[in-house]
Amino acid sequence: MSYAAFKVDIDSWLARDDVAVTGVSIDSIVTLAEAALSRDAYGVMQSRSATLSINARSISVPSDFRSMIALYIDQTTTKIDYQTPEMIRLVDAWNDGGQTLYYTIESDTNGNPVFTFAPAGDPSNPTPAVMQYWSGLPSIITNGTNSLFVNAYDLYLFATLRECGSWLQEETIEARYDGRYNAALQRYNLAEQRKRYGGNAKVITPPPGVIV
């Protein structure tokens, strides 16, 4: 389904003769729905892998980064552990040299998210690291579609209808689709857990340092 067809579907579900939501503020409404989806939905198709070159104290995060799954030294099983921004500066490794042991997530002076490491990376001998992470959702407003829109249309529909209820100041509509959204989200996350872990359902919980 295209974004244009989605907007028609939204008006059809609302069945309002007095106002066409898609003719007023639909982009703003969908943006709010996508913000909730980005926080709530963790699917297999949103997991990514990337190689980092740790060559400084701090390096930029990937543009589509949402939260970390695991970070470890490339070609080894050595895990780089998370510390909070406050604690990482207190560990002995902060002032040491050698192999990177810890990372945190914070912002640079321009407000851009960065990974910060202890010990700091060596520009003359960078540490290659493999990062597994949850990626953000490309917006259907600008991209027309994304994997969640294709594979979990009900989530997109109910999340957007819930925000439509809020925009219309109709608590009944908002509550109705809040219930349907949360039920669909529970089914979706359970199905995604089964994809990752087989029959042994596990809770997918973002680690500390999530960027939303």
Image: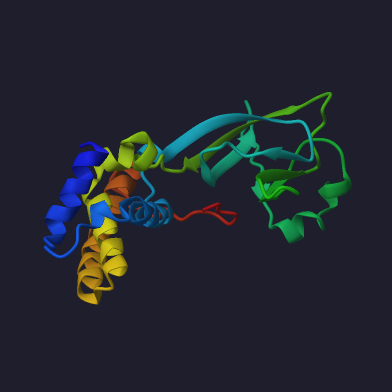
- Placement of the N terminus among the 4 image quadrants: top left
Instruction: Give the total of numbered labels.
Output: 0
Q: Nearer the viewer, residue 38 or 46?
A: 38
**Residue 134 appearing in the image:** yes
96 with respect to 65 (left or right): right
Please tell me which residue lies in front, 159 or 74: 159
Please determine whether, in this image, residue 128 is positioned above or below residue 89.
above
Q: Position of residue 49 (x, y in %)?
A: 51, 32
Please state which of residues 178 and 132 is positioned toward the viewer in this rendering. 178
Kindly give the residue lying farthest to the bottom in the view shown: 171
The image position of residue 165, as x and y in percent, is 26, 67
Query: Looking at the image, which residue is at 63% across and 28% down?
Result: 74
Q: Nearer the viewer, residue 155 or 191?
A: 155
Query: Is 37 displayed left or right of 82 in the figure?
Result: left
Compared with residue 16, is residue 123 higher up or lower down, i.e. above or below?
above
Q: Quadrant of residue 61 in the image?
A: top right
- In the rendered structure, the answer to whether residue 85 lies left or right of residue 146 reads right
Q: Position of residue 209 (x, y in %)?
A: 60, 54
User: Which residue appears at 51% of the width and 53% of the height?
Assistant: 212
Q: How is the image coloured?
A: rainbow
Q: Position of residue 28 (x, y in %)?
A: 38, 54
Image quadrant of residue 163? bottom left
Q: Residue shown at 35%/50% (left/top)?
A: 27
Residue 187 in sight in this render: no
Residue shown at 31% from the left, 46% from the top? 192
**For residue 150, what is the image quadrant?**
top left
